[in-house]
Amino acid sequence: MTERAETAPRRVSIFGSTGSIGRNTLDVISHLGGRDAYKVLAVSGKGNTDLLARQAKECGAEIAVTADETRYGDLKQALSGSGIEAAAGKAALIEAAEREVDWFMAGIVGMAGLAPTLAAAGRGADIALANKECLVSAGELFHREIESGGGRLLPVDSEHNAIHQVFDNSQRHSIERIILTASGGPFRSLNLDEMAAVSPDMAAAHPNWSMGVKISIDSASMFNKALEMIEAMHLFDMRPDQIEVIIHPQSVIHSMVGYSDGSVLAQLGTPDMRTAIGYSLAYPKRPSLPIERLDFARLARLDFDAPDESRFPSLGLARRAMEAGGLSGAILNGAKEVALEAFIDRQIGFLEMADIVENVMDKLGTGGEAISIEAVYEADDTARLLARELVANRSARPLVN
């Protein structure tokens, strides 16, 4: 990337700007100088074109892209007279992602975020990664693009950002383990019979945070932590046996790194995504942000417990995918997405989600090597197709609770 003056605004793009990560990113930018400090080239969203257009105008973006081609007219009309370019569809997302920026927020959820994020990485942008699927499904391919482009990979998920803050690369030879913390969700104390009777409404009620239905259910089943295990392995170039998970209901310690001298370094803070976003945006500096400060005097206790993999088999499936390599992560993720939808639609029970994923992994194996984005998509498609067949063949009647 070309040399620029230190005083010039930093060029950024925010993909997934209408989601929680994107909205928090724009908030952080406003606190850190707004247009004087940052030049926003592109913002992207999907269905909420009114918000997307409003964001584009407020931050002075050059282009706004909706992933939904049917909403192009709405977006164009909302941007009429602003001078901001409107675009829509997958090709437009990739074209906008290829525009030269210094920092790229990868906040598009799911496999839809893979192609534009790879495009930005190939152009040399620093990637603020808030999308799990990029590394879970295409870790080796993604790292090749980062190395080819010359940018940096900066994790934004709170757990991985915490590890990044206490992971001393100069002492990599002394790092023994990464410890990911997990809230444990609402069912950490239930037995198997009780978990088998869990309804989608029960699983969507997270004890700590108000999140979307899918994210909350992934937390309840610990499939979110399973994906984070695979992501951590790729992010920090660790062996599968060096990745641990510990239940920490208070969610104050966001993750830890263990060293060979017995030291364990932890990152603590109030749960606010702006901390991770700000750290990534200003890295290697630490910005001043309006985050609630942690009050240790008010912390009555910090609890920890080992996860029971018999009740949360998703963690064992993650270890299996990590050890197998290849396209195993793409297969796990694709099957999980179908199983999750089937549970939400009351076609299968809560514990059957892991059964579906395990059966798909049994049948497809590693799925080959992640040699291209097409290979990743093919593995994802194959896993989803097989998972749908398994759901359809389940003899259990639809849930009524």
Image (tube, rainbow, N blue to C red):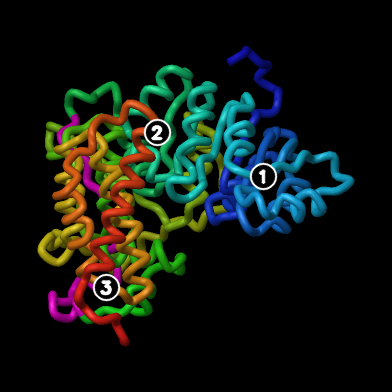
Per the image, the residue denoted by label 3 is 348
Which amino acid type is shown beneath numbered disc 1? Answer: Ala
Is residue 182 within the magenta segment?
yes
Secondary structure under the numbered disc 1 in the rendered image: strand
- Number of numbered callouts drawn: 3
Q: Position of residue 2 (x, y in %)?
A: 62, 13
Q: In the figure, is residue 48 to the left or right of 299? A: right
Where the N terminus falls, by quadrant?
top right
Q: Which residues are magenta?
A: 175-196
Outermost residue, top direction? Answer: 3
Q: Position of residue 138 (x, y in %)?
A: 34, 35
Residue 198, by quadrant, is bottom left
Per the image, the residue denoted by label 1 is 88
Which amino acid type is shown beneath numbered disc 3? Answer: Ile
Which residue is at a point 19% across and 75% down the rendered structure image?
A: 395
Q: CA distance from mark 2 to mark 1?
A: 22 Å
Which residue is at a point 35% across and 37% down the rendered structure image?
A: 376
Q: CA distance from mark 3 to mark 2?
A: 30 Å
Q: Is residue 263 visible?
A: no
Per the image, the residue denoted by label 2 is 374
Q: In the figure, is residue 292 to the left or right of 79? A: left
Is residue 72 within the magenta segment?
no
Q: CB atoms at circles 2 and 1 under 8 Å apart?
A: no
Secondary structure under the numbered disc 2 in the rendered image: helix
Q: Position of residue 85 (x, y in %)?
A: 77, 39
